[in-house]
Image (spheres, rainbow, N blue to C red):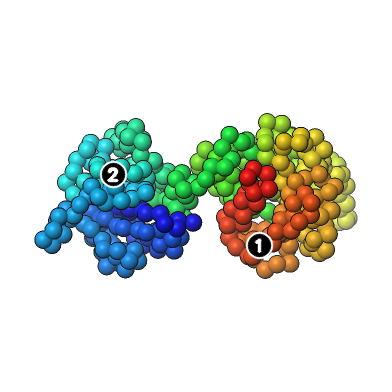
Amino acid sequence: MFEGKKILLGITGSIAAYKSAFLVRQLVKAGADVRVIMTPAATDFISKLTLSTLSKNKVHVDLFDEDSWVNHVLLGRWADVMLIAPLSCNTLAKMAHGQCDNLLLAVYLSATCPVVLAPAMDEDMWHHPSTKENIKKLISFENKIIPVDTGELASGLIGDGRMAEPDKIIRFIDDNFFTHKSLSGKKAFVSAGPTYEPLDPVRFIGNHSSGKMGVAIAEELYGRGAEVTLIMGPSSINLPANGIKSIRVNTADEMYNACTKEFDRSDIGVMAAAVADYTPVEVAANKIKKTNKELVIELKRTKDILKSLGEKKSAEQVLVGFALETNNERDNALGKLKSKNVDMVVMNSLNEAGAGFGTDTNKISIFDKSGKEFEFELMSKKEVAKNIVDTLIQLYYA
Ligand code: CTP
């Protein structure tokens, strides 16, 4: 992913510095050449030895290293990207005002490469007007800010201010600097998650879909430069916080309306949602009371969204469907490819360990319009999404 890329990681004095070890490890594993500089305060939180061992490079803290001067200008020029993670409130303020009282600040001020910042601080500090002003200034210097996460903070309070997780930081760098934007100028929609069909005001018919696969595809398409709308059924997973537009729906009918509208303005449509095939004929106005008799609920068919999009698809539009199967996987997937007139079917089988609903992994095969199969190993849903989008680009946008 990062083969041959040079990343200069600046670490400042924040408890989140413990995550820097994971960050360095993941960057190195992804193929990057990583050099680390720390503020003196950062060394109270994590040791130079840990970071030099993981990065396989000497770690710099001071402007003078034993008897020699550390060339901050060359460090700043060496890097493809300078990442400061965690960025404390103090260093953030100094950067906004051009102060230069340590090596990290000297490198920052002389860096000619793009600079990415992952702030970490307590919620009140994060929301303080002076921090907001400083962030605005850094954005005006064209530094990129990775949004803070919400959760438990060092103070024990719950709120905004946690440093983004290493995975997210790496993804951000990849999306912003290293991924080829092959889908720039294209519009895409992705449907994700389950649908809930109400029986009465308190009950519904649903399914176990988490929406993770669809979200990962939406993020991947966005990372390749597409303008993306995510149409999300009722799922508790976090919606992407970047520039992806989200539309929330509940029922299959609401999903049909949203997808139909979005497809009209899209170049690419991906139906990853687990849409209910049946919905109750009647929705009781009040809670259905139990009796001593059996309860029979009459169901009617919902609209097949993918099929209806396939029928109206233009020659320029690319439509991707999913086939979740438990038996006769290939035949069923190929059947859906033809009957729904889609350009690509992503097949996953509930018989494969680690594949399907709720898991963080998936094992897929992709069939193109001619029925040619592309088979993949079991991997994370993020990696699966990357393969789906790579295949889509290779088949239709190369
Ligand atoms: N799909 C859809 N609308 C529906 C049902 C499914 O758009 N009412 C889409 C799904 O999003 C998926 C594809 O159709 O992209 C296949 O869904 P799947 O549940 O595997 O198959 P079904 O078409 O529902 O057929 P069956 O349940 O018989 O396998």
Q: Nearer the viewer, residue 316 or 120?
A: 316
Q: Nearer the viewer, residue 211 or 307?
A: 307
Q: Is residue 69 visible?
A: yes
Q: Tell me which amino acid carries mark 2.
A: Ala
* Apparent side of residue 357 relative to residue 156 in the rendered image (left or right): right
Q: Earlier in the sequence, mark 2 or mark 1?
A: 2
Q: Which residue is mark 2?
A: 111
Quadrant, the C terminus: top right
Label 2: element kind: loop
Quarter where residue 329 is shown: bottom right
Relative to 313, is 195 above or below?
Answer: below
* Apparent side of residue 243 relative to residue 336 in the rendered image (left or right): left
Expressed as whole percent of the image width and height from the top left, the position of residue 349 reads 73, 62
Query: In the image, what residue occupies the spot 28% across and 44% down?
Result: 111
| Residue farthest left in this picture | 67
Label 1: element kind: loop
Q: Nearer the viewer, residue 47 or 132?
A: 47
Distance, label 2 to label 1, CA atoms, is 41 Å
Quarter where residue 317 is shown: top right
- Mark 1 vs ligand 1: CB under 8 Å? no
Query: In the image, what residue occupies the spot 85% across and 44% down?
Result: 301
| Residue farthest front in this picture | 398
Check whether the beta carbons of the residues at disc 2 and disc 1 lie within 8 A of each other.
no
Q: Which mark is residue 376?
A: 1
